[in-house]
Image (cartoon, rainbow, N blue to C red):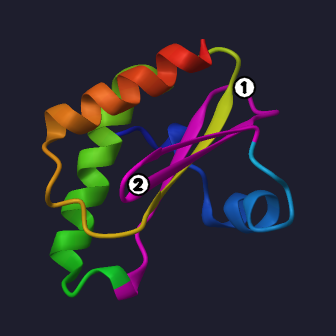
């Protein structure tokens, strides 16, 4: 699992990302949307938004969130400049394997650096 210091807190998310601030970069993979904001914090941070109405079971939602956190984990600690990355799940990601998500986030981080 990803360390707590690399997660965006709920208060920061509501204050910074739910307002009218536009993302600096956007990426998408069929049912996954990634919004990237340049951060004023010392390290990069990540949040995964999995709406309750998209998943019928909590366990399924948590499995998808863990898959995304595991795909982001190798890159988030070493990313410069610091970024806030918000991943929004549109539909259940059951059709994607962890290796497909890993390659998607590899492409995302390579295009950001």
Q: Let me know if residue 78 appears in the view.
A: no
Q: Which residues are magenta?
A: 24-53
Q: Quadrant of the C terminus?
A: top right
Q: Where residue 42 appears, x then y in whole percent?
A: 72, 25
Numbered tag placed on residue 42 in the rendering = 1
In terms of image quadrants, where is residue 106? top left
Q: Residues within 10 Å of mark 2 (few under 14, many from 20)?
A: some
Extreme residue toward the front, this view: 30
Foreground label between 1 and 2? 2
In terms of image quadrants, where is residue 73? top left
Is 18 rendered above or below residue 101?
below
Relative placement, left or right, of 46 versus 40 is: left
For marks 1 and 2, the one nearer the N-term is 2
Q: Where residue 49 appears, x then y in whole percent?
A: 47, 64
Is 73 rendered above or below residue 58?
above
The answer for how far apart the CA atoms under marks 1 and 2 are is 26 Å
Extreme residue toward the right, this view: 20
Q: Let me know if residue 46 appears in the view.
A: yes
Closer-to-camera residue (73/88): 88
Closer-to-camera residue (4/49): 49
Numbered tag placed on residue 107 in the rendering = none
Q: Which residue is mark 2?
A: 32
Residue drawn at (60%, 51%) of the image: 8
């Amino acid at each position: 699992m990803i360390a707590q210091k690399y997660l965006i807190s709920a208060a920061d998310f509501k204050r910074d990302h739910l307002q009218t601030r536009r993302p600096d970069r956007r990426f998408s993979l069929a049912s996954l949307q990634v919004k990237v904001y340049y951060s004023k914090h010392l390290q990069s941070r990540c949040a995964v938004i999995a709406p309750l109405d998209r998943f019928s079971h909590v366990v399924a939602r948590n499995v998808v969130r863990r898959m995304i956190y595991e795909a982001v984990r190798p890159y988030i600690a070493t990313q410069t400049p610091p970024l806030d990355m918000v991943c929004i799940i549109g539909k259940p990601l059951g059709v994607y394997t962890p290796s497909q998500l890993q390659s998607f986030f590899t492409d995302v981080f390579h295009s950001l650096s």
